Image: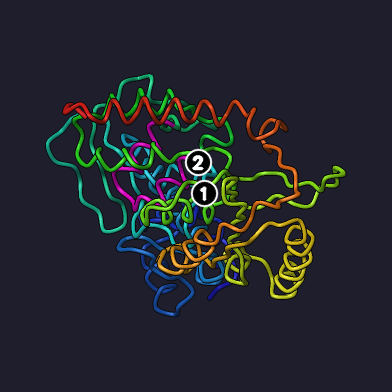
Amino acid sequence: MDPRTAHALRHLPQPFTAREATSADIPRSTVKHASSVAFLVSPARGLYAVREPWDAASPWERHRLMIDTAVRLFPDAIVSHTSQAVLLGLPHPSHPPDSVRMTVLDDVRTSRRSTWCRFHRGTTPPEHIEIRHGVPGFIAPRVVLDCCREVHARDALAIADGALRVGMTSLEQLFDMRRHQRRWPYVARSNDVLLLADGRRETWLESVSAWSMARWGLPTGIPQVNVFTPEGEFLGRPDAFWPDLGLVGEADGSEKYLLEGTDEQSVLQALERERLRQEPMAALGLRFVRWTPRDAIDGTAIHSRFQSLARDVRHQNVAALFRCSCCDSPLTECQVEAELAVWRRKLAKEFERKVW
């Protein structure tokens, strides 16, 4: 490949169309030749990208690049659903959707088809749109509810928890958006997600674990509780805690850290830190139920381990002290716990109405 041509192709937005190349004074024949010699790859029909950086990109990095292309090519549509969620920095699984999600603003009966971009349609009041970095996007409550209708509930819960955690939305805003979409397709899928949503969870894995436990009928643990010795020494902050059982829950194992992109040496160090952290907590009477990401998705192993520990009630001699990580108050005084209890009762009452 001629160095000047290669330089010009690298400086096009990635991926690009043949028309965009032509606009940059790169003939279609050059694009065709660059593809034939494998300098370019075709991520989707009609799109081209320089092979080396494209192959080196992670699946979600490629999805973000495809989002940028969709924004350029379809200015009358707005990035939405899981594609907008990742732009907002919300939690997501290891693999992106198979196509960019966008919403067509006019209420047409059909939407355009594309092999790499899926178009939704839906009523879009002006207040559902905000401008970020010069590009229109949906507000977080709309993104959360749209994801609830489209993706697996465990992933939707992670997105909802993430949006609550960073203050992008509130429980009441999610409630109002649920009412707005009450007649939209598959909106009932959001009901269980909203009942479980808790902004104190910190990762996709924690949210997926909470969803899996709920599906197996296990009680909802309190996320991210600070554990102290009787003398006030901080021991750690486990993923979940069940005060009535003296039971600590931890999503761990090497898969957890590899999922987060941690290198192998750091994984080994993290596992050793986990072991060292557990010992003083166990000495104070706490018991541990642990699970891997694979366990969290399936749920069978968590259920079995939890039930086995819960049947043994000889746990009354717990000497550790506990404070909520969100407000540094004793668990019995945490306002977030009280507000969540009120919220869940309110939702349960609303969901009993047929209009929901």
Whole-percent x and y of residue 55? 52, 71
* Residue range highlighted in magenta: 141-162
* Residue 56 position by quadrant: bottom right
Asked if residue 161 is among those painted magenta in the image, a careful observer would answer yes
In the image shown, does 175 or 250 lie closer to the viewer? 250
**Rendered position, 90 above or below 298:** above
Tell which circle, 2 or 1, labels the residue nearer the N-terminal end: 1
> Contact, CB < 8 Å: mark 2 with mark 1?
yes
Residue lying farthest to the left in this orientation: 109
Q: Amino acid at mark 2?
A: Asp
Q: Can I make out residue 106 in this image? A: no
In the rendered structure, does residue 157 fall within the stretch colored magenta? yes
Kindly indicate the quadrant of the structure image that contains residue 263: bottom right
Name the secondary structure under disc 2. helix
CA distance for labels 2 and 1: 8 Å
Tag count in the figure? Answer: 2
Task: Please name whichever residue, 249 or 41, is drawn nearer the observer in this view of the structure.
Answer: 249
Front residue of 166 and 280 = 280
Residue 91 circle label: 1
The local crowd at label 1, few if under 14, some if 14 to 19, many if 20 or more residues have their Cα within 10 Å, is many
x, y percent for residue 334:
63, 29
Residue topped by disc 2: 161
Where in the figure is residue 252, as x and y percent of width and height? 61, 65
The residue sitting at 79% across, 60% down in the picture is: 280
Residue 266 location, x and y as percent? 74, 69
Q: Nearer the viewer, mark 2 or mark 1?
A: 2
